Image: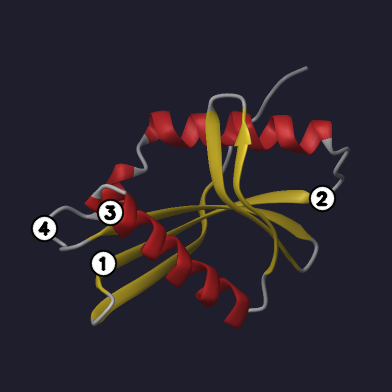
Amino acid sequence: MARHNELGAWGEKVAREYLLTQGYAIGGENTRIGNYEIDFIAMKGDRIVFVEVKTRSTDYVDPLEAVDSRKRARLVRAADEYIRSMNIRLEPQFDIITVVGSPEKYEIEHFPDAFFPPLRSY
């Protein structure tokens, strides 16, 4: 596995453990919907939560900036497709978790409701 893939897998493991300690019930990991992969699909209270995890070895580049408007739009489309296909009647929430560092020393930051999907007209 390439180094960046190992780093990403490690970051997702850290994020998973964090979500569980915060009371999230994880229902899906690395769920593929079309050409997009959702890192975590979880439940918290009366919401279905779609979580994007970004991992970096240093804070030279803010991992939060990697979730740009294009990536957010793709996540929203994938979540919409998931919600429709599973006939889910819960309010969606979009979270971002950033993990910066290495297994020896790292920082994790959680941004609940990191962004809101654009309103759709039907």
Q: Which is nearer the N-term, disc 1 or disc 4?
A: 4
Residue toward you, 9 or 113:
9
**Which label belongs to residue 60?**
4
CB under 8 Å between discs 4 and 2: no
Separation of disc 3 and disc 2 at Cα? Answer: 28 Å
Label 3 sits on residue: 63
Which color mode does the image show?
Answer: secondary structure
The C terminus - image quarter:
top right
Label 1 sits on residue: 100
User: Could you tell me which residue is drawn at 61 percent across and 29 percent down?
Assistant: 77
Label 2 sits on residue: 90
Separation of disc 4 and disc 2 at Cα? Answer: 37 Å
Residue toward you, 30 or 79:
30
Q: Which of marks 3 and 2 is in front?
A: 3
Separation of disc 1 and disc 4 at Cα? Answer: 10 Å
Q: Tell me the amino acid under the disc marked 3.
A: Pro
Say above or below: 69 vs 112. above
Q: Tell me the amino acid under the disc marked 2.
A: Leu
Q: Is mark 1 on a helix, strand or loop?
A: strand
Q: Tell me the amino acid under the disc marked 1.
A: Val
Residue 81 picture location, percent across and down:
71, 29
> Among all residues in the image, which is located at the extreme front?
1
